[in-house]
Amino acid sequence: MIDLRSDTVTRPTSAMKDAMMAAPVGDDVWGDDPTVNAFQANLAEQAGKEAALLFPSGTQSNLVALMSHCERGDEYIVGQSAHAYRWEGGGAAVLGSIQPQPIENAADGSLPLEKISAAIKADDFHFARTKLLALENTIGGKVLPAEYVLKATELARERGLATHLDGARLFNAAVATDTSLKQLCLPFDSVSLCFSKGLGTPIGSALVGSQAFIDRARRWRKVVGGGMRQSGIIAAACQYALDHHVADLADDHRRAERLAAGLAKLPGVEISAQATNMVFAHFPDEHVKPLSAWLKEHGILIELLYATRFVTHRDLDDADIDKVIAVMEAYFSRH
């Protein structure tokens, strides 16, 4: 089966499973799992932060970050298209009593500086207290411009706001721009990093920041049910991915370009965007249902809509991309 729905469908390799099974473990809630401790220390060093904390998911990592930066009645500024706002069940509001102040994302995924500035509330008890700016990189596959990130985080600091980055696919940004993880994390007070997407672990995200911030986050992680016991098996997978899978993301980006070029030649299909490992395409309405069925018959999984996202990942190879293009060409040749 060729699955292009998301890079979350990746499966652990045999070597990763071996690392997981060989990992020394302890009780991480007590802080004595050696594999977790070693991974967190290593990741913090690579990210240029004082400390790191392992989580089961990026959604929980983002939620805990927001709850560690903000109190009840506070507000965070976030993009309308941001995962933390749009795709995480409203957790900040539901569980953290933190009000989101969404801003429409620009075409490159950024939040216009003038809109950020205008959204910051005055210090008045009639208003929620604006405490945090949350950005995402990559967003929709697009890498946030480095110059923009510096300006946005500088604006936030000048206005007394903390900064958080949803870096679920920050490793894609690092590979695409040949920039170190440390450099990409540097402007932010906290960063959430995911290992279960393009890096191929079965589970696992991490939050990095100052020691004081991670101390607060550890308490909130326990509150929201994220404290895990012998989680060294998860940390071992994340460490293996960090050591062996990051550079491979370049192949995912190359294959996304290859896929976009092939889809662009199909009649009536419009490529609206291609960046890193994602392709966004528009299909004529009349073809959505029959094409979806055709693809499934040929062992290809895509959540085919009028506007469709294709995501390449490490479980695909060049032959898979060529097959997808060929199967689509065969469909359109008959219709």
Image (cartoon, rainbow, N blue to C red):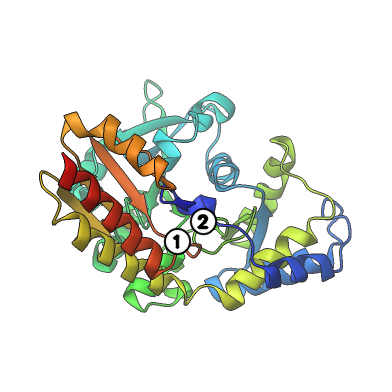
Q: Is residue 79 visible?
A: no
Residue lying at the far top in this picture: please name it. 126
On the image, the x and y values in percent for residue 312 come to 39, 59
- The image's mark for residue 197 is 2
Judge from the rendering whether residue 115 lies leftward or rightward of residue 267; answer left or right.
right
Residue at image coords 17%, 49%? 272
Task: Please state which amino acid type lies under the numbered disc 2.
Answer: Lys
For the residues labelled 1 and 2, the Cα–Cα distance comes to 8 Å
On the image, the x and y values in percent for residue 112 come to 20, 48
Task: Please state which amino acid type lies under the numbered disc 1.
Answer: His
Judge from the rendering whether residue 122 lies leftward or rightward of residue 96; answer left or right.
left
Residue at image coords 42%, 74%? 183
On the image, the x and y values in percent for residue 58 come to 55, 48
Disc 2 packing (10 Å; few <14; some 14–19; many ≥20): many
User: Is 39 located above or below residue 83 in the figure?
Assistant: below
Q: Is residue 259 visible?
A: yes
Residue at image coords 24%, 58%? 274
Quadrant assignment, res 321: bottom left
- The image's mark for residue 137 is none
User: Is 33 located above or below residue 80 in the figure?
Assistant: below
SS type, badge 2: loop
Residue lying at the far left in this picture: please name it. 268
Residue at image coords 86%, 63%? 25
Asked if the residues shown at circle 1 and circle 2 are in contact, with their CB atoms under 8 angstroms apart, the answer is yes
Foreground of the two, 263 or 331: 331
Disc 1: which residue: 313
User: Is 57 located above or below residue 325 in the figure?
Assistant: above
SS type, badge 1: loop
